Amino acid sequence: MEEKISTISIVVYNREIAYQKVSDILHDYGKKILLRVGYPMKEKGIAIIFLVVEMTTDELGALSGKLGQVESVKVKTNTLKI
C-alpha cells in the first residue's frame, strides 16, 4: 500500500488522565511522524497536538483509532492530495 502524507490534530481535554497515554501511542509511531508540535494550555487543563505523518491509510486509521479510544481525546485526520 502507498504511503501518503497526512495531518492529525489531537485535542487532549484532560491532561492528567490522557497525556501520558497519548505520548506512549505517538512514541510507538515515531518513525512515521515527520512533525510533532504540541501546545499545552496548563491553565485550561488541555493540550493541542498537531502531527504531520507519512503512512498508509491502514496505519493512519490504526493510529487515529488508538488515540480516539483514549478518554478525553478527540482526533481529526486529513490526507493531503499530492
Image: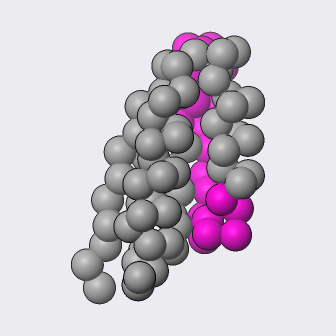
Measuring from the top left, give residue 66's x and y in whole percent. Answer: 52, 40
Measuring from the top left, give residue 58's x and y in whole percent. Answer: 42, 64
| Residue shown at the point (52%, 38%) measured from the top left | 67
Q: Which residues are magenta?
A: 29-48
Looking at this view, is 25 or 8 the one in front?
A: 25
Q: Is residue 73 above or below residue 54?
A: above
Quarter containing the N terminus: bottom left
| Residue shown at the point (66%, 44%) measured from the top left | 25
Count all numbered tags in the image, as a single digit. Answer: 0
Q: Is residue 38 magenta?
A: yes
| Residue shown at the point (32%, 59%) measured from the top left | 78
Q: Is residue 45 above or below residue 21?
A: above
User: Which is the main secondary structure of the residues drawn in magenta?
Assistant: strand
Q: Is residue 62 above or below residue 41?
A: below
| In this rendering, position of residue 13 left or right of residue 36 | left
Task: Using the rendered view, name the quadrant where residue 17 is placed.
Answer: top right
| In this rendering, position of residue 21 left or right of residue 49 | right
Quarter containing the C terminus: bottom left
